[in-house]
Each structure stands twice: as structure tokens, then as C-alpha cells.
Amino acid sequence: MSQRKKYEVAFLEGYKPAVITTKKNPFIPELIKYPHNSSFDSDSNLYIFFQEEQQKTEFEKQIENIQEESYDYHYIIGLTLGFPKRSVQFYANMRQLEEILGKYPEEEERNGIGVIWSGFFFSSHFVFFKEDVRWLWDTYTHPKAINHPLFLWTEETSYLEVPYGDFHRLNEMHEYILQKRGLVPAI
């Protein structure tokens, strides 16, 4: 299996718009040089770093008066970190459902797929994750981002590797996941 790029590296290479990390992260000496905020969350050990001061200012305006752990909180953070909008909406909805249920939502276990690519790691939904992957590959075209493999993660399959830009393989992996989940018959 290929090496997965760390999110801090993607940020330092200039194409990941923001990262959240702890104060104990070994990349802190490099990250601390960037605009950052440590008061966006009640966890005083977290920082969010931005490529530009303008991003930090915009984030602070958006997050002001937003209740921590609310839908809007997760939505703003997800978009700020550079994740696809539909996956951010799915994640924010699942966090709200988790708050209501008091446990991890079965819907997320049943429909969620972890997407890992070139310093990005987020939860998506099996119905639209292929569109989100296309969005990633179309949006982040930095020379140090492209040509890294994409990894899909599910409980049933562990990590599945997809070469950069290989939509045929992505479709095959989608079918494989559906088969593993018993949603289509195995051929």
C-alpha cells in the first residue's frame, strides 16, 4: 500500500487551505508561522491554521456566535478545511444526529465511506462519494497533490487504493463496497 500524505504536509505545500491540530503536533514549529486561531473551540489544545490572514478573518466572522458542535459549526469548519460541500453537509448532519441519539448514528455506519487523498481525510456517503472525489481531483490540482493515490475506507473493506484520476477503478471500488455491504448481488 502506498504512503498516505499527512494533512500538515499538504498544508505546508500550499494547497490545503487550513488544518486543525493539537499544540503537541510535531509540525507546530512550522505551522505556528501561519495565521491561526486557538479560541474557536473549547478545547484549548487545538489550533486551526490558515494559508492567509484573510482566510482567518473570514473564518472568525463566520464562526462568531455559532454554537460549538452545532450543524453550522461543523459545516463552517468542514468547508474551511477544504472538504467537498456534500460530504461536509453529511458529516454535519451526522454530528447533529449523534447529539440527539447520544450515540454514533447507524446511518453513518451503514452509508459512510472514509476518503483519504493527498492530505485530505473526510467522511462521505456511498451515494455521492464519487462526485466528491471528482471535485477533489478537479479542485486541488497543485503539482504536489496530483498523482497521489486515493484511499477509501469502510468497516467491510479496510483501505482500498485508487490511482489518481482513475475513475474506472473508482467505479469498480464503488461496486465492490456495495457488494460487501450486501446492497448489490456479487457476480
Image: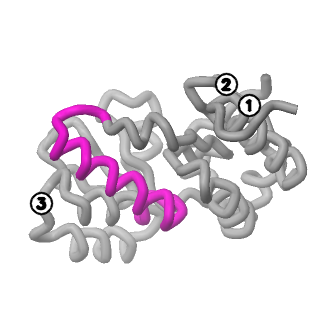
Residue 86's place in the image compared with 1, above or below, is: below
Question: Which residue in the structure is indicated by mark 1?
Answer: 160
How packed mark 1 is, by other alpha carbons closer than 10 Å (few <14, some 14-19, many 20 or more), is some
Q: Nearer the viewer, residue 82 or 134?
A: 134
Residue found 40% across the figure and 62% down from its top: 89
Q: Is residue 83 magenta?
A: yes
Name the element at disc 3: loop
The CA distance from mark 1 to mark 2 is 7 Å
Please name the amino acid that badge 1 sits on: Leu
Q: Is residue 34 visible?
A: no
Question: Which residue in the structure is indicated by mark 2?
Answer: 157
Specify the quadrant that holds the N terminus: top right
The CA distance from mark 3 to mark 1 is 36 Å
Residue 167's place in the image compared with 65, above or below, is: above
Q: Is residue 138 magenta?
A: no
Instruction: Confirm or deny contact between disc 1 and disc 2 (CB under 8 A).
Output: yes
Q: Which of pointers 2 and 3 indicates the residue nearer the eye?
A: 2
Residue found 60% across the figure and 55% down from its top: 127
Main SS of the magenta part reads helix
Question: Which residue in the structure is indicated by mark 3?
Answer: 67
Instruction: Confirm or deny contact between disc 3 and disc 1 (CB under 8 A).
Output: no
Range of residues picked out in magenta: 79-104
Q: Is residue 112 visible?
A: yes
